[in-house]
Image: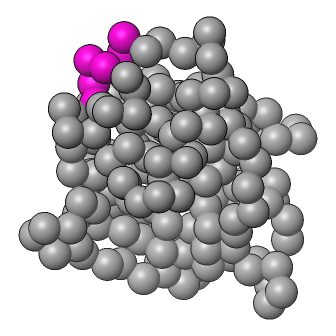
Amino acid sequence: MNLRDVLARIDGLLKRCGIEYAVIGGYAVAAWGEVRATRDIDLLCGAEDLDTLKHALTESGVHFEHRVGDPDDPISDVVRIELGESGELYELDVLFGIREAPAGILERSRPVQIQDLTIPVASPEDTIILKLLGGSARDIDDARSVLSTQRGRIDLSLIRQLCPEPHKPILE
């Protein structure tokens, strides 16, 4: 099972359930910035869809683990799904609620083509904001990658408007 097959499987499940989502994390960075090796696929869904997804996964026979973040954790809930065969195993983390993340990420997502599959990916602006919120050295490098690659095509005023104040220095 390759990346396209994994994405097609989860995309189909989410669409059947009427769950809106966007690819975030390393694969969003790859869509808008520099490609880097990762087998971890991160998706963002609305908090109201958590129970619907858990039910659909159970009904489909897909093994998953639901984790609830601590009160100081920036992510409130994560559903971790493993798809594929040994040696070609992909981990999908479906995130529900990211502290300080701006509203409207799902609505601002953009369609990206992977072979014959079109999937929603967080916009370059939202990808930068989410990476700045993550705050690790890798996250900051990812944000810089998207800023550099998308130079002239990115809405810096939107990023400045939506990004929480302590995370803005990279934008200056």
Q: Residue at x 76, y 48 (%)?
A: 35
Q: Position of residue 36 (x, y in %)?
A: 73, 55
Residue furthest toward the left?
71
Location of the C terminus by quadrant is top left
Q: Quadrant of residue 60?
A: bottom right
Q: Is residue 2 shown above or below 119?
A: below
Q: Is residue 150 shown above or below 74?
A: above
Location of the N terminus by quadrant is bottom right
- For the magenta stretch, what is the residue range? 157-163
Q: Quadrant of residue 95?
A: bottom left
SS majority, magenta: helix
Q: Nearer the viewer, residue 139 or 44?
A: 139
Horizontal relation, residue 106 to residue 145: left or right: left
Q: Position of residue 83 (x, y in %)?
A: 68, 76
Is residue 158 one of those drawn in magenta? yes
Q: Nearer the viewer, residue 54 or 125?
A: 125
Is residue 53 one of those drawn in magenta? no
Q: Is residue 55 visible?
A: no
Q: Is residue 165 visible?
A: yes
Q: Residue at x 57, y 67 (%)?
A: 92
Q: Is residue 8 shown above or below 107?
A: below
Q: Nearer the viewer, residue 37 or 136?
A: 136
Q: Position of residue 130 (x, y in %)?
A: 40, 43
Horizontal relation, residue 169 to residue 149: left or right: left
What kind of colouring is applied to the model shown?
one colour
Q: Quadrant of residue 37?
A: bottom right
Q: Is residue 48 shown above or below 172?
A: below
Q: Residue at x 61, y 53 (%)?
A: 26
